[in-house]
Amino acid sequence: MALNQQLEDVLLRRNSFADDDDDGSGPRRLLRELQPSIPDYTSPPLDDAVAATPEAYRDDDVIGAFRTMAAAGNCTTGSSTTDRCHIPFVPPSDSFDQPGTVGVILYCGGLVDPRSYAPLARRLADRYGLPVVIPVFDADVALSFGVCDSGRLRLAQAEFTNVAKWVLVGHSLGGLAAMVDAWTYRDDPTVGGLAMLASYLNDGLGCGESDFSTTSLPMAGVTASNDLIINQTNAELYKPLYSNETLFVDVYGGNHALFGSYDDSERKPLLGQVDGEPIIPPAVQWDLTVAAIFHVASRTGVDLPQKLEGAQCPPDTSAAVSLGSSW
């Protein structure tokens, strides 16, 4: 069985971690057995993603240092911005009438370099005025098994103190991490929404029932028609867990990897993952995804920044829209 299918079978079972460890035969035991077989690998960002990353965070050594800090539990909310283990995206102050008071925390997919999601974060910041942080996790795995609070909400709040509401967004395995944090903080007024990208809710991760149908939390579920990684059966099975305030979007022609910008060529031999072929440019999928996230942000009850008259969006320099693109 391919590694990614093993992970999904374990992670996305309906059984609660809290209830099945007594006899040593539950998901926790399986996870302990499986974790050593996870390869020392992460999908690297493509050039357009690195270019969209703030300059101070483009270097491999900077991201590697964050991973090491996260592994040691040394990410802090202190005054030093280099100890927060995330990549911040600051909206251009000369383009909006006020600082953004709705922010986004963007949890990356499993074994994917966090810089790969810079095209999404850059669009949210530059086009919509939303502050964004992309957390950097140990080994690029956002979900810590048995941990119901990643701590990333507090780190984001330390970065952008003016933000009143946070929308938690996650791709693939990162969607589960975003879901766990959103459920843990469901009574915290600073959590304003949740968006799942090529992911789905699950009530069996040991952090409570994670049933958002009992809440009015603004949400979005964004999928792609050519995604062959996500388990479509489970995605449909868990839809009743979403709130009644959920926008569902299926990006026609998109695939799993195009929610970011990374080289996924090694994921088939190492992880057994075979994605579908996209028939749209990456920029189209990014734009539709970002629009869905902004739709959630617009329903948080907080005033959003408005573009100043004459303000221009920074040019999109991604390869996906250049004349020399393979598209």
Image (cartoon, rainbow, N blue to C red):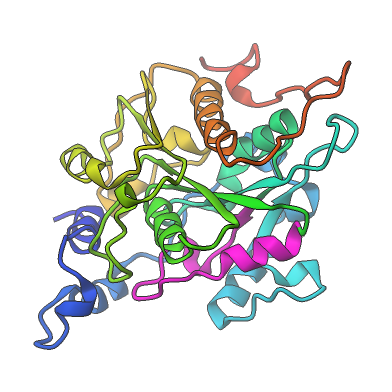
Residue 233, image x, y percentages: 15, 39
Based on the picture, tell me whether residue 283 belongs to the magenta stretch.
no
Based on the picture, tell me whether residue 137 belongs to the magenta stretch.
yes
**Of residues 105 and 41, the one drawn nearer to the viewer in this rendering:** 105
What residue is rendered at 68% in x and 55% in y? 87
Q: Is residue 29 visible?
A: no
Residue 96, image x, y percentages: 83, 31
Find residue 100 and report its image quarter.
Answer: top right
Q: Is residue 211 left or right of residue 9?
A: right
Find residue 283 and report its image quarter.
Answer: top right
Q: Is residue 33 left or right of residue 174?
A: left
**Of residues 209 and 63, the one drawn nearer to the viewer in this rendering:** 209
Residue 246, image x, y percentages: 39, 36
Placement of 251 over or under 88, stated as above or below: above
**Of residues 258 and 75, the one drawn nearer to the viewer in this rendering:** 75
The residue stretch that appears in magenta: 133-160
What residue is rendered at 68% in x and 76% in y? 76
Q: Is residue 190 left or right of residue 268?
A: right
Q: Is residue 219 visible?
A: yes
**Of residues 74 and 270, the one drawn nearer to the viewer in this rendering:** 74
